């Protein structure tokens, strides 16, 4: 158990941040999953900007790595272009 007031506060802050980050990372993963589940090109193209926006926001605050964000965006764009 922590002995200092500051370390107790740090533990509280880290837990709060962890839950916040988990929520937004999960939201992003669900958005990607939803886009990959669509088979209509127009529908997928309409979803793409919102998904990219979520991915970029998470990369900006280091919840996901910037390279992972770029890889995701690239793969999603390829997926959309392959749809008939």
Image (tube, helix red, strand yellow):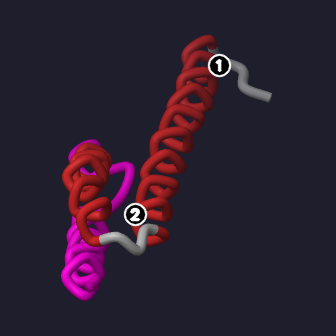
Location of residue 11 in the rendering, given as x and y in whole percent from the top left corner = 62, 27
The secondary structure making up most of the magenta span is: helix
**Residue 83 vs residue 16, the one in the foreground:** 83
- Of callouts 2 and 1, which one flags the residue occurring earlier in the amino acid sequence? 1
* Quadrant, the N terminus: top right
Where 4 sits versus 36, above or below? above
> Furthest residue to the top?
5
Location of residue 10 in the rendering, given as x and y in whole percent from the top left corner = 55, 24
Residue 78 sits in which quadrant?
bottom left
Residue 41 sits in which quadrant?
bottom left
> Furthest residue to the right?
1
Q: Secondary structure at mark 2?
A: helix
Whether pointer 2 and pointer 1 mark residues with C-beta atoms closer than 8 Å, the reply is no
Instruction: Tell me if residue 71 is in the magenta stretch.
Output: yes
Residue 35 marker: 2
Measuring 22% from the left and 47% from the top, which residue is drawn there? 53
Location of residue 51 in the rendering, given as x and y in whole percent from the top left corner = 30, 53
* Quadrant, the C terminus: bottom left
Lateral position of residue 53 relative to residue 65, left or right: left
Where 44 sits versus 27, above or below? below
* Label 2 Cα crowd, 10 Å radius (few <14 / some 14-19 / many 20+): many
**Residue 50 vs residue 45, the one in the foreground:** 45
Measuring 62% from the left and 21% from the top, which residue is drawn there? 12
Look at the image and give the residue range highlighted in magenta.
Answer: 59-84
Instruction: Tell me if residue 78 is in the magenta stretch.
Output: yes
Lateral position of residue 68 relative to residue 2, left or right: left
Question: How many numbered marks, from 0 up?
Answer: 2
Residue 8 marker: 1
Residue 53 marker: none
């Amino acid at each position: 158990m922590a002995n200092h007031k500051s370390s107790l506060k740090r533990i509280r802050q880290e837990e709060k941040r962890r839950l916040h980050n988990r929520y937004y990372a999960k939201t992003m993963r669900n958005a990607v999953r939803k886009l990959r589940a669509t088979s209509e090109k127009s529908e997928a193209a309409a979803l793409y900007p919102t998904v990219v926006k979520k991915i970029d926001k998470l990369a900006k605050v280091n919840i996901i790595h910037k390279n992972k964000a770029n890889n995701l965006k690239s793969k999603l764009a390829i997926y959309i272009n392959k749809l008939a």
